[in-house]
Amino acid sequence: MLFSSELITKFSKCPSPYVANLDAFTLYSLFLARLLPPEIKDKLAQLKSGQIDMVKLDPVTDHMETTPTPCDDAIIGTKPNFFSEGVMGAIAAELGEIFGYREQNGYVIHDIFPIPGMEHSLTGANSKSSLSFHSDGSTHPIITPDYLLLYCIKPDPAACNHIALLPDLLAQMSGELFQLLSQPRFAHQVDVELAVENKDSFIIQPIIMRQGSELIIKYDGDLVTGLDKTSENAIRELNALIHKTAIEVHNQANTVLVLNNKKSVHARSAFQPRFDGTDRWLQSAFVSKTPLGGMQVIDIRQRSLAEPCPA
Ligand SMILES: O=C(O)CCC(=O)C(=O)O
Ligand SMILES: [Fe+2]
C-alpha cells in the first residue's frame, strides 16, 4: 500500500540509525509506528498473535532509489534520507525492539548487497551462489531475533527469496523425524559474522526446540551437521521437506517482508552481480519481542550484563 505524501515526508525525516547513540532513531521510530496505515498494523497484529508467520507488504512508495548500490561496507548510510530505515524502525517498534549484534558491525539496519570477491561466500554478500535455507542469528549465545525485516531497495529479477514455514514443515513431518530433530544431536557452527573469538566454534543443540509453550526452529543449511549417521539422515529429510513446502517470494522495490524468524527458514536464489551501482540492495533488521533493557546492540563480551537471557 502506497504511503500518502504526508507520510512519506514524515518517514523521510527519520534520523540516521548508523550512529553510536540510537536514542533519536528509536524514539522517532515509536512516533512513526503510530502513523503506520491500519492495514499494515492489522497484518503485524496477526504476526504478533501467531496467526501468521510471514507478512509481505506491497510497495510502500513508488520512489526508485537513485543512490548507487554500495559494494563495500565503507559507504553505508549514504542515501539522501532514511525513509526505508524509518519504515523498518516503525515496523520493529510495532513488533518489539530493534537490535543488532556488535560482532556483525553494530548497526541495527544491515545493508545487504553483493560484494566483489564474495560471490560464493556463505553470507548475504554472495550472489553467484544461492544462500541456503537458514534462520538469522540461530547460533548467537545471547539472543536470536524473533522477527526479521527485509526491505527491498533495489530488486534483481533473478533473485527471489524462498520461505518455508515451521507449521507447514510440522504438518508434513513424521513423528520419528520430529523426535530426531528435537534432540541435541546437531552441531551448529557459529556464523562467521558472529564468531569473533573462535572462528571454528560450534554449539550442540536440537533444530526444533521449545520456547515456552511453542515450537521453534533454529537452522542453517550450510552450518548445521548431524553428530551421527541417523542425525545426518534427519537433516537430509528436513532439507527435502523444506524444499517441498517452501514458497517463492519476488521482492519489488519498496516491498517489505516480515518473517517470524523462529517459525520459518529463508533462502535466496543466485543472481549475477554487476558491481556498477545498479545491483540488488536489501536492508534487514532484527526484532526482539522481549524488551532488551536498553541493550540495542548486543555484545557477547557483556554477556553477564544481559542476564537473564531472552531465548
Ligand atoms: O538477500 C536476501 O534476500 C536475504 C539475505 C539473508 O537472508 C541474510 O543475509 O541473512
Ligand atoms: Fe537471513
Image: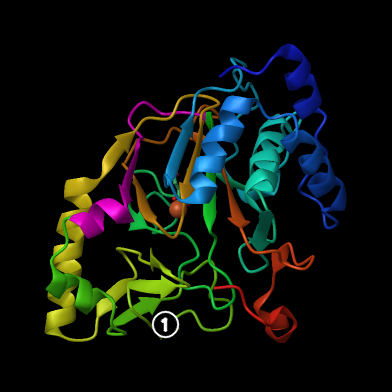
User: Is residue 304 rendered to the left or right of residue 209?
Assistant: right
The quadrant in which residue 300 appears is bottom right
Say which of 291 and 235 sits in front: 291
| Residue position marked by numbered label 1 in the rendering | 202
**Residue 301 point in image, percent of width and height:** 69, 82
Q: Quadrant location of the C terminus?
A: bottom right
User: Is residue 138 rendered to the left or right of residue 108?
Assistant: left
Name the residue: 80% across, 25% down.
Answer: 10
Task: Tell me the kind of residue under disc 1.
Answer: Phe
Name the residue: 67% across, 34% down.
Answer: 87
User: Is residue 4 rendered to the left or right of residue 279?
Assistant: right
Name the residue: 43% across, 70% down.
Answer: 213
Q: Which residues are magenta?
A: 154-171
> How many neighbours does mark 1 have within 10 angstroms: few (below 14), some (14-19), or many (20 or more)?
some
Say which of 128 and 37 sits in front: 37
Please count the marks in the image. Answer: 1
Say which of 162 and 211 sits in front: 211
Q: Is residue 72 above or below residue 102?
A: above
Q: Is residue 253 above or below residue 226?
A: above
Q: Is residue 22 above or below residue 151?
A: below
Residue 129 appears in the picture as rendered: no
**Residue 294 point in image, percent of width and height:** 79, 65
**Residue 15 point in image, percent of width and height:** 83, 39
Say which of 52 and 17 sits in front: 52
Q: Quadrant location of the N terminus?
A: top right
Q: Is residue 143 above or below residue 186?
A: above
Residue 160 falls within the magenta-colored stretch: yes
Residue 107 falls within the magenta-colored stretch: no
Name the residue: 31% across, 72% down.
Answer: 224
User: Is residue 296 rendered to the left or right of residue 159?
Assistant: right
Q: Secondary structure at mark 1?
A: strand
